[in-house]
Amino acid sequence: MRHRKAGVKLNRTASHRKAMFRNLVTSLLKHDRIKTTDAKAKELRRWADHVITLAKRGDLHARRQALSIVREKAVVHRLFEEAPQRFGDVAGGYTRVVKMGYRNGDSAPVSIVELTGEKPETAKSAKK
């Protein structure tokens, strides 16, 4: 029985799955929106929401835990600066999955995963 088993296997080994979702989370946090298959998108929500919750907590241990998941230091630093303003009053549900249809090559269902909330104004964009 599959009771209380969280996550999906996606026909990959554990190491491949972990590496893939670490890359997807990094890309999502870097670009604010990515396109992927439906099954990956649904699991990516769990990973991204966890990292954003760590960023909202904001302490040193949370930063180190986020750095163990996200591959780029700059992305983590930007997330820890933006998350309290962007997601401060929201308790979960930091991502949105929008179904886009089917991929041409193999007819796999494709979705866009994007971060919710308004992107805060940065100092660089305010100067321009």
Image (tube, helix red, strand yellow):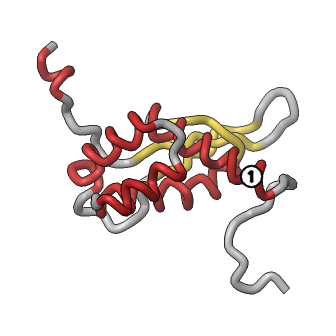
Name the quarter where the C terminus is drawn: top left
| Label 1 SS | helix
Label 1 belongs to which residue?
17
Q: Is residue 91 placed above or below 103 in the rendered structure?
A: below
Name the quarter where the N terminus is drawn: bottom right
Residue furthest out toward the left: 127
What is the number of callouts on the image? 1
Q: Residue at x 81, y 55 (%)?
A: 10
Q: Residue at x 55, y 61 (%)?
A: 46
Which is more toward the observer, 60 or 106? 60
Q: What type is the residue that disc 1 sits on?
A: Arg
Q: Residues within 10 Å of mark 1 (few under 14, many from 20)?
A: some
Residue 21: x, y in percent?
Answer: 64, 49
Q: Is residue 96 placed above or below 57 in the rendered structure?
A: above
Along the horizontal axis of the image, is 40 left or right of 29? right
Along the horizontal axis of the image, is 102 left or right of 65? right
Q: Residue at x 20, y 30 (%)?
A: 122
Along the horizontal axis of the image, is 48 left or right of 94? right
